[in-house]
Structures are given as structure tokens and as C-alpha cells.
Amino acid sequence: MTETQFLMALSETTKAYKWTIDGKTIVGVAKNGKSRGEKFDPITAVCRSAGKGTYPSTARGKKTAAKKLGVDTTLTSSVSVATKATTNRGNGQVLRGKIRQVVGV
């Protein structure tokens, strides 16, 4: 899955999640299903909405969800950096802006 495909899949999750910024972290709270009210990051949210399983927003959960989606490790780490806003330079910052635009935060 490429970055564009990931962002397109993420844009389709806006009805199933309430996206907010918690501190500096982008978080989606599930609105439906068994995991209603739980917090998800963008990778695990896309995996859950694609029907490939529900994983926690931990490092191991993100890695497993990315494998299920077919996302490579570079994009996975870039999305993690963008979600947490750990740096304000490079691809992480650009991707953070795209994610925020897609989910409407």
C-alpha cells in the first residue's frame, strides 16, 4: 500500500471515527462496533475499518496492522512520527498535514 492509497483509505474512516488531536497526537475514537469508545491511531483505524482485525495502538499493534494492510515499514514509521508529532521536519511533518486534512482535524 502506498502513501496515497493509505490516505484514501483513511479518508473513508471519517464516519466510523471521531478524529481529534489529544495533546499533539492524532487520535480516532471508534463510534461503532464492539470497540466503541476505544482510541485508535490512523494505521490501526484503517486496519479495523478494512475488516482485517482490531489491534491496539501500541508499537506491536501498529506493526501487525501494517503487515495486514500491506504497508511497508518506512511508511509505517512515517505515519507513527506524523501521528505523534515527534519532529517538525521532513516527511513526517508533510504527512501530518495530509493526515489532518484527510480526517478533518
Image: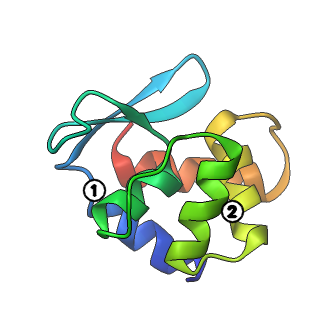
Q: Label 1 is placed on what type of residue?
A: Thr
Locate residue 64, reporting x and y percent: 60, 62
Q: Label 2 is placed on what type of residue?
A: Thr
Locate residue 5, reporting x and y percent: 47, 79
Q: Residue at x 66, y 60 (%)?
A: 63
Residue 85 picture quarter: top right
Locate residue 98, reporting x and y percent: 53, 56
* Quadrant position of the C terminus in the picture: top left
Q: From mark 2 to mark 1, how far is it between C-alphas?
A: 18 Å
Q: In the rendered image, is residue 58 in sight?
A: yes
Q: Is residue 36 left or right of residue 2?
A: left
Q: In the rendered image, is residue 95 in sight?
A: no
Residue with the mark numbered 2: 76
Vertical relation: 39 (above or below) 75: above
Give whichever of 57, 92 is nearer the camera. Answer: 57
Give the SS element for disc 1: loop
Give whichever of 98, 62 is nearer the camera. Answer: 62
Q: Residue at x 28, y 56 (%)?
A: 13
Marked residue nearer the N-terminal end (2 or 1): 1
Numbered tag placed on residue 13 in the rendering: 1
Q: Is residue 87 left or right of residue 105?
A: right
